[in-house]
């Protein structure tokens, strides 16, 4: 269908209610969707407290023939995975290692002075620049051909609602941290504008069926299929949320570093993770956004992963020495679980056809899984884990690349270049002098 009318005229002509708009305005055959070429997407996933390096990294650079125990869940996507070892966060200044680990991770710039005290280190405040996810989102939003409804979406799983430097990785600008939404109900409401009392859980689609029927006769067969799949997803997601006890209270973890998370909320992490990933994948399929972040707990996160047999707090466990074999095994299991979440996200993206385009969402999406530390017990910010999955940036995948302690600002610049955003510096320019990273494409 050729675009012969505006969105407002189309909605008014058919008498469509505002609640139906998220379902219809990105259908390709209506002519309102952004169809300006390939839709590239970026997801940045954060998990805390470093990794057990011997159980994480490939021993040698080159083609990936297998994964170490922490990364085994990514085996179905080995040919679409890239391990970048030797990327280091060298940003100095105020704040402890965890604070600079998360606050400088995506910004590549120092923290402002502040009053958040970390151990014996000088206190610090928020980051003094914007983060690369927002830089890329702003770049895409500036062009009508790549502009989307939200630009970026910030998801969370058990992120403390208390805001401090340990709990924020995305920044809209200096002193402008972005709070991830870690309540699936709240994210659902943001995406679909659901105004009813969530306890009633009467399907929003009951109010939309007539509007959706009006639209069906105006769209192509492919778009009718997309419309049906989108509507079915929302119905199933609402049912899932209605049956998940306790999820509506997610996101209010105890902000103190030592006590950790509220026990009842803690044990909901697997369900919350799945719900958030499903919502994220559907937001991409609907072209609500092309940039997303997913933050698991926070720097110094103290989740207790009892569902995999780990009863100690994650941060507490990460401080055990490498000679503690039991602790090393449990930390490996923790990162194995995080890898399972990445694998589930990749699977969901890969089983979702690219709307109006070729291949799947995973073919056009790059997942970047990272951390604030290389290893928890040393607090090193050398060898920060950077695991990339998917084809969104056209990097050569299925490999391990070992660098000689390069500045992570260069990787942040490389991500922007993958979207055609040819910046020559990002964050602190002193760490950008050698340009983007080699051996990615």
Image (cartoon, rainbow, N blue to C red):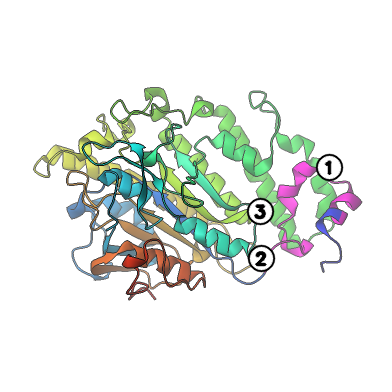
What residue is shown at x 51% (from left), y 52% (from top)?
Answer: 292
State the separation of the CA atoms marked 1 and 3.
Answer: 24 Å
Which residue position is annotated with label 1?
210
Give the SS element for disc 3: loop
Which residue position is annotated with label 3?
149
Give the SS element for disc 1: helix
Marked residue nearer the N-terminal end (1 or 3): 3
Find out whether the residues at labels 3 and 2 contact each other: C-beta distance under 8 Å. Answer: no
Marked residue nearer the N-terminal end (2 or 1): 1
Residue 432: give x, y in percent of width and height. 35, 69
Q: Tell whether 213 sits left or right of 236.
A: right
Residue extending farthest front = 113
In this view, 393 is above or below 299:
below
In this view, 157 is above or below 248:
below
Span colored in magenta:
9-35
Pick whichever, 95 or 104, lies toward us: 95
State the separation of the CA atoms marked 3 and 2.
Answer: 17 Å
State the separation of the CA atoms marked 2 and 1.
Answer: 25 Å
Residue 105: give x, y in percent of width and height. 36, 53
Let me know if residue 342 appears in the view. Answer: yes
- Using the image, tell me which numbered label, if any, was put on residue 356: 2
In this view, 250 is above or below 171:
above
Residue extending farthest left = 323
Pick whichever, 218 or 35, lies toward us: 35
In this view, 178 is above or below 249:
below
Residue 287 placement: quadrant: bottom right
What residue is shown at x 58% (from left), y 34% (from top)?
Answer: 185
Mark 3, Cα crowd under 10 Å, few <14 / some 14-19 / many 20+, is some
- Depth check, mark 1 against mark 3: the one in front is 3
Residue 127: give x, y in percent of width and height. 40, 49
Marked residue nearer the N-terminal end (3 or 2): 3
Specify whether residue 16 is painted magenta. yes
């Amino acid at each position: 269908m050729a675009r012969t009318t505006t969105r407002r005229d189309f909605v008014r002509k058919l008498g469509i209610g505002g609640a139906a708009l998220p379902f219809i305005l990105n259908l390709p055959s209506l002519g309102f969707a952004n169809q300006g070429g390939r839709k590239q997407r970026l997801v940045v996933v954060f998990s805390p407290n470093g990794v057990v390096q011997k159980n994480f990294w490939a021993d040698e650079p080159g083609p990936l023939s297998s994964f170490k125990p922490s990364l085994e869940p990514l085996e179905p996507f080995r040919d679409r995975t890239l391990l970048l070892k030797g990327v280091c966060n060298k940003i100095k200044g105020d704040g402890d290692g965890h604070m600079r680990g998360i606050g400088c991770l995506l910004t590549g710039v120092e923290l402002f002075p502040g009053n958040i005290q970390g151990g014996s280190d000088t206190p610090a405040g928020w980051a003094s620049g914007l983060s690369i996810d927002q830089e890329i989102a702003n770049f895409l939003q500036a062009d009508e051909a790549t502009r989307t409804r939200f630009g970026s979406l910030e998801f969370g799983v058990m992120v403390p609602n208390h805001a401090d430097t340990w709990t924020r990785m995305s920044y809209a600008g200096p002193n402008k941290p972005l709070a991830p939404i870690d309540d699936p109900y709240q994210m659902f409401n943001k995406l679909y504008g659901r105004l009813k009392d969530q306890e009633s859980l009467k399907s929003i689609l009951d109010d939309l069926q007539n509007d959706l029927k009006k639209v069906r006769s105006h769209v192509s067969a492919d778009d009718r299929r997309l419309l049906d799949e989108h509507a079915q997803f929302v119905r199933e997601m609402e049912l899932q949320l209605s049956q998940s006890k306790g999820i509506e209270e997610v996101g209010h973890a105890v902000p103190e570093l030592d006590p950790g998370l509220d026990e009842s909320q803690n044990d909901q992490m697997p369900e919350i993770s799945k719900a958030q990933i499903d919502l994220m994948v559907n937001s991409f399929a609907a072209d609500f956004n092309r940039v997303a972040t997913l933050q698991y707990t926070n720097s110094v996160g103290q989740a207790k992963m009892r569902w995999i047999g780990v009863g100690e707090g994650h941060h507490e466990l990460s401080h055990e020495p490498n000679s503690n074999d039991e602790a090393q095994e449990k930390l490996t299991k923790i990162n194995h679980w995080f890898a399972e979440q990445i694998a589930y996200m990749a699977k969901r993206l890969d089983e979702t056809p690219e709307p109006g385009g070729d291949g799947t969402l995973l073919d056009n999406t790059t997942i970047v899984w990272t951390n604030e530390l290389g290893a928890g017990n040393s607090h090193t910010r050398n060898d920060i884990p950077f695991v990339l999955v998917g084809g969104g940036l056209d990097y050569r995948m299925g490999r391990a690349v070992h660098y000689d302690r390069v500045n992570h600002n260069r990787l942040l610049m490389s991500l922007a270049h993958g979207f055609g955003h040819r910046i020559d510096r990002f964050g602190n320019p002193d760490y950008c002098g050698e340009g983007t990273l080699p051996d990615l494409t």
